[in-house]
Image: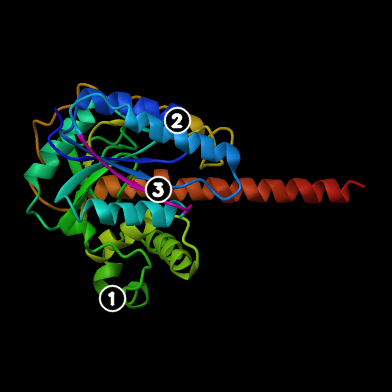
Amino acid sequence: MCESAIVLIIFNRPENTKKILEQIFIAKPAKLYIIADAARENEKEELELTIKCKELIDKIQWKCEVKKNYALQNMGCGLRISSGLDWVFSNEDSAIILEDDCVPAQSFFTFCDQMLHKYKNTTSIYHISGTRWNEEKQTDEDYLFSRYAHVWGWATWKRAWQQYDYSLSKWPEAKKLENYKLVFQSENEYIFWNSKFQKMFLAENKSTWDYQWQFTIAINQGLCVTPAKNLINNIGIDGTHLNIKTGTSSFYFNRKVDEQFTVTKHPEILTYDNVYDKYHFRKHFYNSTAKKIKKKLIAIFKKLNLFFSF
């Protein structure tokens, strides 16, 4: 049985929601929080799908306290999830969070329970990830501390979420601070994240919430617990929220999870794993951006070639 409260964020994907609920049923938490956005205006088909998702929640059969926070009108991903988590942490000191496309291994719940308990009073630790990227870069311990807060299945504490800055109001001053600059290991890394935070700061309608969470962790030099094995399989390639180009799905989606994962060896020092983070940034963030730029340039050159061929 999962000891922690679980949060499930749903919207318009009943088939995905059903798969997540099947895993939550096995874990049988005593408390389940549901955050749901409303259908977009004049989207009749989407309205029907959101109703189907909520009907699945009403069919929960195990003994469980279910709390619901359903938006009356569409709020969008950024505001709906962030405001929903504000509500959760007004009731709980810690929680495990899943979106409707993140299928967890049962070992994920055990891992989160263990880490939430072990580090509940360690204020330098902000985040527990369920997703492990770049598993080829292994360490001797069963988890490490990273700068990066991956949110495909994660957990945190009220003490950390209370510092969340949805509007990035602290960004103009924070970017000038030496402590903020010291979080990053290279000029490329510093420029990469500055561009992300600046773009989100300037956006009037913020379409997401996770860059703000990464910013909150960065300005506080927070640590993110990251397992040695992957514990989450993202099945969100159906395109409801994402526009995934052909060729990327094999890396990001339908990844294997380690159902047998357990923690027996803990890191001895509470500090960033700089070796892993340097490798991870280059392979996961920077390399991904470089590939996108390369594709755009190829498309431009193809158009130019077509133009000049006449």
Mark earlier in primary sequence (1, 3): 1
Give the Cα distance between marks 2 and 1.
Answer: 45 Å
**Is 271 situated above or below 8?**
below
List x then y, in percent, for residue 219. Answer: 27, 66
Q: Looking at the image, which residue is at 52% across and 35% down?
A: 48
- Give residue 177's mark: 1
Along the line of sight, the residue nearer the viewer: 170 or 267: 170
List x then y, in percent, for residue 123. Answer: 12, 58
Label 3 residue SS = helix
**Is 56 situated above or below 123?**
above
> Looking at the image, is mark 1 or mark 3 nearer the viewer?
1
**Is 29 situated above or below 95?**
above
- Give residue 14's mark: 2
- Give residue 276's mark: none
List x then y, in percent, for residue 301. Answer: 73, 49
Proximity of marks 2 and 3: CB atoms separated by less than 8 Å: no
Label 2 residue SS = helix
The residue segment tinted magenta is 65-74
Looking at numbered disc 2 in the image, what kind of residue is underneath it? Pro
Where does label 3 land, which residue? Answer: 282
Q: Give the side of residue 254 with respect to residue 279, left or right.
A: right
